[in-house]
């Protein structure tokens, strides 16, 4: 019985080996044929696909852009928000000796050693969407993504312009709902907003900032508490529209939405719709499709030997009820 | 201390330790911010605790039966996403029962693994936490789920409606708590749950079908999760895939805070409700006081540990353990 079994295994193995040899021969021939056009192999490790529609749309757009390009072959990985898993994925990609690695950092500090490893293996690293901490800049070829500090400043400008239009720029009081604590995007947007608001509207008071963790339900709860705590709120700045809409829902339920200017960032479909209804004032238009395509293009440019600036931002314009018709409704 | 535990007041304290801890927090927060006890705020806190609370009711059964359920958070995300998606496809009348059936199937599957196959509940539900999350993402393709016509649906009644001036989520939570409280305290099934958790072997020898009781506890838990998902979906009429992420630990904290033993065999629905309210009021109170966010993590857990300590100290009539 066991002898037969062994023989069977040997046979199977032999078949596999023959097949592999044949395939190898074929692919060697193929490689020779495509010598000048051998596809670039680009690996990407993403932060947390599925946590929000932005990241999901990003992934779909990335894959679509890669498929549209015959010269590109991609290895698409997702860290699921887990730093340890992302580091392991970086190591896998280094082992696979890809031509370039794109990383959407789960944590700006913790991934630095892995990025450094890729750098030592002479694989160019492109950081996408949110940058890693400054200590790691030496090991990164380029950063491709939105400029979150500018986004925060622009939101402050939108808010201030609106207050001026309403004639309350000398007394308005603002609360802020920030993104996940410790997340670079959250920190930068908050910094941009905090720094810019007093420059453009020196008499507006930012009364309190609390995190909504990029989560609509969480920020709804935070806003409920703000509404209890403060009788007078004129503006809410949320680190993204998802949280902004959560805050709006809380204000609507408390019958206090009228008279509050809601400004977000990363215009989501729900934010766009609330703007259409006149309940939500403005946001920052950031397309995950542009984001994904910019990252892939940066990788392709680097592999082709082009020089890129270290900070390779794509533009994220202001969107308000006044100019929203110039923009298509976000798909996410 | 020794003499106090023998006195009448000591016996009262021993039974009501957690209630006293609760009262202490309420007084503390009220002194810190006068609006803490305003009807508006209290109503708001109870309403937003209702979702966690409904889930905690089901988990109370599981914990008393001597098991754990760490899957409720991602299961709630699943129910929320499914009911929102089906709402636009087949209408709310069919979407709600369809979502309940799917969620109950998940609960039955977990119940089968833990009850009939006798697999460790920690491992099974930890695994299901990830598996169900994956299932939800596969179902939705990772996209946010939103009801298209938010104005024109009666579906919003479960999360946003109110009757007799009380928000519907609170009514659902209290009704379900009363119902499950009776089931746990007054029915043969409830007594069997205690028996299985208290001493499984003894329960088996008394002719109790242990596997069936454990199975039913998980089904009960998934039913509560479906109710929670319904409220959540109805409250915001749209959701991320991760809406319930991390709730499993808050639920467990509430149940344990209410005095249920992780080893099984003890706990009541009433105390779980108190545990839920304590958690809700702590989180809200810290926001109102305006503590910096990073500090809130630390303070929340310091208060929870303090509450558990007060409860235990009251039970044994001493602040420190005798075997120290």
Image (spheres, rainbow, N blue to C red):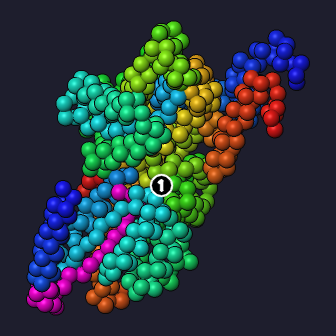
- Front residue of this view, candidates B204 and B244: B204
Q: Residues within 10 Å of mark 1 (few under 14, many from 20)?
A: many
Residue at image position (21%, 58%) is A2
For the N terminus of chain B, the quadrant is top right
- Tell me the quarter of the picture where residue A30 sits: bottom left
Q: Is residue A40 magenta?
A: yes
Location of residue A274 in the rendering, given as x and y in whole percent from the top left corner = 35, 44
Q: How many marks?
A: 1
Whether residue A124 is visible, yes or no, is yes
- Front residue of this view, candidates B45 and B270: B270
- Tell me the quarter of the picture where residue A290 sits: bottom left
Task: Note whether B148 is above or below A306 in the view shown.
Answer: above
Whether residue A314 is visible, yes or no, is no
Q: Mark 1 sits on what residue?
A: A239
Residue at image position (41%, 73%) is A91
Q: Is residue A231 magenta?
A: no
Location of residue A263 in the rendering, given as x and y in whole percent from the top left corner = 45, 52
Give the side of residue A258 with respect to residue B271, left or right: left
Location of residue B67 in the rendering, given as x and y in whole percent from the top left corner = 50, 31
| Chain on which label 1 sits | A
- Front residue of this view, candidates B324 and A318: B324
Disc 1, SS: loop
For the C terminus of chain B, the quadrant is top right
Residues shaded magenta: A27-49
Residue at image position (66%, 42%) is B301
Residue at image position (33%, 48%) is B134
Location of residue B175 in the rendering, given as x and y in whole percent from the top left corner = 47, 15
């Amino acid at each position: 019985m066991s002898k037969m079994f062994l023989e069977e295994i040997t046979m199977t193995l032999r078949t596999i080996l023959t097949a592999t040899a044949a395939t190898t021969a074929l692919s060697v021939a193929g490689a020779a044929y495509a010598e000048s056009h051998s596809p670039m192999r680009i690996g990407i490790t993403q932060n947390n696909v599925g946590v929000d529609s932005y990241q999901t749309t990003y992934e779909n757009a990335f894959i679509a852009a890669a498929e549209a390009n015959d010269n590109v072959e991609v290895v698409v990985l997702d860290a699921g928000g887990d730093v340890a898993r992302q580091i392991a994925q970086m190591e896998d990609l280094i082992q696979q000796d890809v031509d370039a690695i794109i990383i959407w950092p789960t944590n700006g500090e913790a991934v630095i050693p892995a990025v450094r490893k890729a750098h030592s293996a002479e694989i160019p690293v492109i950081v996408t969407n949110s940058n890693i901490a400054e200590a790691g800049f030496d090991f990164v070829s380029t950063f491709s993504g939105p400029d979150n500090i500018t986004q925060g400043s622009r939101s402050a400008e939108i808010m201030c312009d609106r207050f001026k239009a309403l004639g309350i720029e000398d007394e308005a009081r603002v609360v802020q709902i920030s993104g996940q604590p410790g997340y670079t995007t959250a920190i930068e947007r908050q910094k941009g907003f905090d720094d810019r608001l007093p420059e453009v509207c020196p008499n507006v008071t930012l009364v309190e900032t609390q995190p909504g963790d990029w989560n609509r339900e969480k920020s709804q709860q935070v806003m409920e508490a703000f509404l209890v705590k403060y009788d007078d709120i004129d503006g809410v700045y949320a680190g993204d529209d998802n949280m902004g809409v959560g805050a709006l829902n809380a204000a609507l339920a408390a019958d206090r939405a009228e008279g509050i200017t809601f400004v977000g960032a990363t215009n989501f479909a729900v934010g766009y719709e609330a703007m259409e209804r006149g309940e939500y004032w403005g946001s920052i238009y950031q397309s995950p499709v542009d984001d994904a395509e910019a990252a892939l293009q940066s990788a392709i440019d680097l592999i082709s030997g082009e020089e890129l600036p270290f900070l390779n931002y794509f533009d994220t314009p202001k969107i308000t009820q006044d100019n929203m018709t110039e923009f298509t409704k976000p798909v996410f | 201390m020794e003499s106090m535990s023998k006195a009448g007041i000591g016996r009262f304290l021993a039974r009501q330790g957690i209630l006293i801890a609760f009262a202490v927090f309420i007084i503390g927060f009220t002194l810190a911010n006068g609006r803490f006890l305003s009807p508006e705020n209290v109503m708001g806190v109870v309403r937003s605790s209702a979702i966690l609370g409904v889930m905690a009711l089901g988990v109370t059964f599981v914990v008393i039966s001597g098991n754990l359920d760490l899957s409720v958070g991602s299961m709630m995300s699943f129910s929320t996403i499914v009911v929102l998606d089906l709402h636009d496809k087949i209408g709310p009348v069919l979407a709600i029962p369809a979502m309940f059936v799917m969620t109950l199937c998940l609960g039955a599957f977990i119940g089968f693994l833990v009850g009939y196959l006798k697999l460790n509940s920690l491992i099974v539900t930890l695994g299901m936490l990830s598996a169900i999350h994956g299932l939800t993402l596969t179902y939705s393709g990772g996209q946010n789920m939103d009801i298209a016509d938010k104005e024109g649906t009666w579906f919003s009644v479960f999360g946003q409606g109110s009757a007799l001036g009380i928000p519907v989520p609170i009514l659902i939570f209290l009704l379900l708590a009363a119902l499950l409280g009776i089931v746990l305290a007054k029915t043969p099934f409830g007594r069997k749950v205690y028996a299985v958790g208290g001493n499984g072997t003894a329960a088996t020898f008394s002719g109790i079908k242990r596997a069936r009781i454990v199975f039913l506890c998980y089904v009960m838990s998934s039913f509560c999760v479906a109710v929670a998902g319904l409220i959540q979906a109805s409250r915001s009429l749209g959701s991320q895939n991760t809406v319930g992420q991390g709730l499993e630990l808050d639920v467990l904290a509430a149940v344990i805070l209410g005095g249920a033993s992780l080893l099984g065999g003890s706990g009541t629905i009433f105390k779980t409700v108190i545990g839920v309210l304590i958690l809700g009021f702590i989180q809200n109170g810290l926001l109102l006081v305006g503590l910096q966010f990073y500090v809130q993590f630390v303070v929340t857990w310091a208060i929870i540990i303090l509450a558990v300590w007060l409860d235990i100290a009251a039970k044994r009539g001493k602040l420190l353990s005798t075997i120290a």
